[in-house]
Amino acid sequence: MKIILLGAPGAGKGTQAEIICERLSIPAISTGTIIREALKSGTEMGRKAKSYMDAGQLVPDETVIGIIQERLKEEDCKNGFVLDGFPRTIVQAEALDKMGFPIDKVLDIEVADEYIIIRTSGRRVCDSCGAIYHVKYKLSKVEGVCDKCGGTLIQRKDDQPETVKERLKVYHEQTEPLKEYYQQQGKLFIVEGEDGIEATTRKILSIIEAQP
Ligand code: AMP
């Protein structure tokens, strides 16, 4: 199954993508993670993307479209995939439609902006493996230390409150129109995402597992 997770930054797409990919044995593909990895390994693409990310802006369409085009050709995508953070503009959605991987379902996780600001400001990520924690909702066993790999937990620059406000503005202007785009294709499912991880997961799995 080929799935897109839509939703504002901090709506829980990353966590839900991981759960779905375990359940269906398909890869979760996050453009944000791919870009952060490129940045860490010092590639030219990573360096170019940094200024956009730090400012809460979107990286140019052609860059992310190129990333996804390459990634979806890989063997592990044969039985499907979950896209987390792509597409984020109409141009990206149209490019995806032309790539020849027809999407089955688009799930939009809806969370109010006020709640997003609380969630993202408490989010911590492992600077080594990228695992996600929260100072209130998802604690690590030892404060500041990743449960999975022992790495250090940090706050991403783009999770700082001023940047989050900018990212939300960008989301409403450029990404929210995708709801209408996929509604017209008959693929959109709205998932209310404020009731915590488990309740949101239950709703998402029931949509994914429903026929067709
Ligand atoms: P994320 O981890 O998905 O919130 O992505 C972090 C940052 O990476 C975003 O704020 C953008 O700067 C960039 N990014 C990730 N995915 C995309 C995309 N599909 N289009 C443009 N920029 C993106």
Image: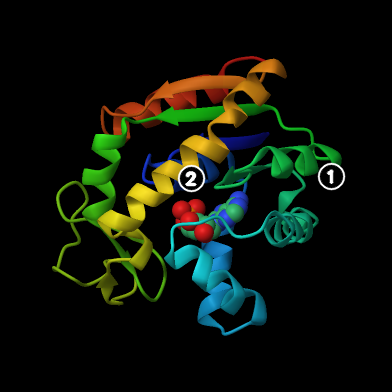
| Cβ at disc 2 under 8 Å from ligand 1 | yes
Q: Nearer the viewer, residue 9 or 30?
A: 9
Q: In the rendering, at what x and y percent does residue 208 appear? A: 56, 25
* Contact between labelled residues 1 and 2, with CB atoms less than 8 Å apart: no
Q: Nearer the viewer, residue 32 or 103?
A: 32
Q: In the rendering, at what x and y percent does residue 2 appear? A: 68, 36
Q: In the rendering, at what x and y percent does residue 62 appear? A: 74, 58
Picture quarter with the N terminus: top right
Q: Of the numbered discs in the image, which one, if any, rests on residue 99?
A: 1
Residue positioned most to the bottom:
42
Which numbered disc flags the more N-terminal residue, 2 or 1? 1
Mark 1 residue type = Met
Q: In the rendering, at what x and y percent does residue 117 appear? A: 26, 45
Label 2: state its secondary structure: helix
- Above or below, 97 relative to 62: above
Q: Which residue is mark 2?
A: 170
